[in-house]
Amino acid sequence: MLTIATLGCGARGRTYSRFAAALPDRYRIVAACDLVECRAQEVAGLHPEQPAPVFLTAEDFFAAGKLADLLIIATQDRDHYAHAIRAISLGYDILLEKPAAQSLIECEDLDQKAREAGVSIGLCFVLRYTPFYRSVKEVIDSGKLGRIISIHASEGVEPYHQAHSFVRGHWARSEHSTPMILAKCSHDADLLCWFAGSEIAEISSFGRLDFFRKENAPVGAPHRCSDGCPHAKECLYDAHRYLTDKRGWLRMVLDGAETASDEKVTDFIKTSPWGRCVYHCDNDVVDHQVISGEMRNGVTIAFTMTAFDSGRSMEIYGTKATLKGGAAWKEAKAYELSVRDHATGVTTEVPVMHPCEEGYAGHGGGDFGIVDSLDKLFGGRGALQPGLDGLAGHRLALLAEASRLTKQTARVTIGK
Ligand SMILES: NC(=O)c1ccc[n+]([C@@H]2O[C@H](COP(=O)([O-])OP(=O)(O)OC[C@H]3O[C@@H](n4cnc5c(N)ncnc54)[C@H](O)[C@@H]3O)[C@@H](O)[C@H]2O)c1
């Protein structure tokens, strides 16, 4: 039985806690903390027969000492480092939402302090736990691809998702959260390291905020969608879509969204950041970025992030075969995951076992998958070593951002 405390009971903290509470013979939620009481109460009440204590500030929570084997930290990006440092000092193993911290120095500091304290920190790289990416890893480990020579991957954020999270939402300004390449693509950076079996050696990156700017606002567009925008009908980003086909996104930002009346949602659109015209926000994070790099073991990588596509795709070129998979292939009605053997020229489908039970959803099954692995990660056989697991991916993303900002087309070199 692994006991769990949750600090930050917003969208992510609630998701992990609910999945954990649904496995009561393995996990027990023993404390919940959030600045918003109803969120903490919801998590604390997940075992109704024995509700957990509620804390309304991180200070009160940490002052109570070590309350559980594992602490889930799912507060906002800018607080992760400070909350993790406090948790390490109390001896908690930690499931830490990504990004671990806002700078490479802080990430490395967390790694060092965790090692010194004998504490394991797992980052919420939920994609590692999806059936799709597990299948990719199995193919690599089977040796079918031979030696991996290069990897090409892409992430299409999807235009409305970009608008919701990275133009109007929590991750729109890098000074308040983290750069887009870390906030959104730290999963991809982690996967690149995981699949290449190495760390980044040299990297260059380009990208900018091109589209979601005031220069691109249609003539006469007001600063709020509710102020009678003449373009509402044809605008892809009209906030009134939160009343209809985009309502699901409100669960992340509006308490009680599931049962909220249309009046409440309309009021939210009138008053919250999510009702702003996407061309008149204060966003500064990129809407497209590319990375090219070389790993320490010589594998080359190329990665594209764009607001203007949907889903992740990947190609892995090996000496014996090529793997192709992901959204682009599925959309083209090809195999979702396939391997083409160089010797025979034959392409074979790799079956991906998608679980279909309700609840096994969220990030392609990864949200449940990571919770299902917690007792193995923190205490079981093959458990995480002390330190920050996932540091390599963060290093890749943060060095890419440094390259983009300094416009150093020469690579950022950290030695081979
Ligand atoms: N792993 C993934 O795939 C993934 C996906 C989305 C978001 N995230 C990350 O997860 C984190 C949480 O995202 P979210 O969408 O759940 O955000 P959220 O805003 O819904 O949740 C954060 C919660 O933390 C609470 N909080 C903030 N400061 C606090 C404090 N000092 N003490 C106690 N509670 C505090 C807030 O009240 C809020 O309820 C972010 O860092 C985000 O980048 C990860």
Image (cartoon, rainbow, N blue to C red):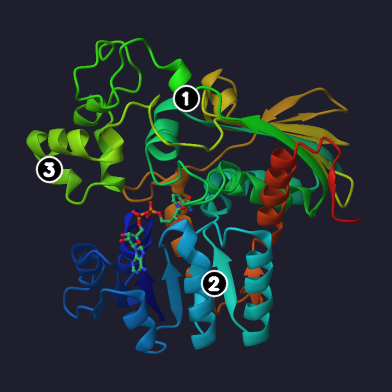
Instruction: Kindly identify the residue that appears in the image at 81 percent across and 33 percent down.
Output: 321
Q: Which residue is mark 3?
A: 260
- Picture coordinates of residue 218, whole percent (x, y): 38, 12
Question: Which of pointers 3 and 2 indicates the residue nearer the eye?
Answer: 3
As shown in the figure, which amino acid type bears the numbered disc 3? Ala
Residue 72 x/y as whole percent: 43, 69
Say which of 333 and 182 sits in front.
182
Q: How many marks?
A: 3
Residue 69, position as x, y percentages in the image: 45, 82
Tell me the crowding category of disc 3: few under 14, some 14 to 19, or many 20 or more residues within 10 angstroms, Cα based.
Answer: few
At horizontal 82% and vertical 37% (from top left) the residue drawn is 150
Disc with the residue nearer the chain's start (1 vs 2) = 1
Q: CA distance from mark 3 to mark 2?
A: 39 Å
Rendered residue at 30%/73% (across/down): 32
Is residue 373 in view? no
* Ligand 1 positioned in quadrant: bottom left
Which of the 4 quarters of the picture holds residue 16? bottom left
Tag in front: 3 or 1: 1
Badge 2 element: helix
User: Residue 252, can we see it?
Assistant: yes
Per the model, the C-alpha gap separating discs 3 and 1 is: 31 Å
Q: Is residue 273 left or right of residue 288?
A: left
The residue pinned by badge 1 equals 213
Q: Which mark is residue 376?
A: 2
Sequence-wise, which precedes: disc 3 or disc 1?
1
Q: Quadrant of the C terminus?
A: bottom right
- Amino acid marked by disc 2: Lys
Q: Amino acid at mark 1?
A: Arg
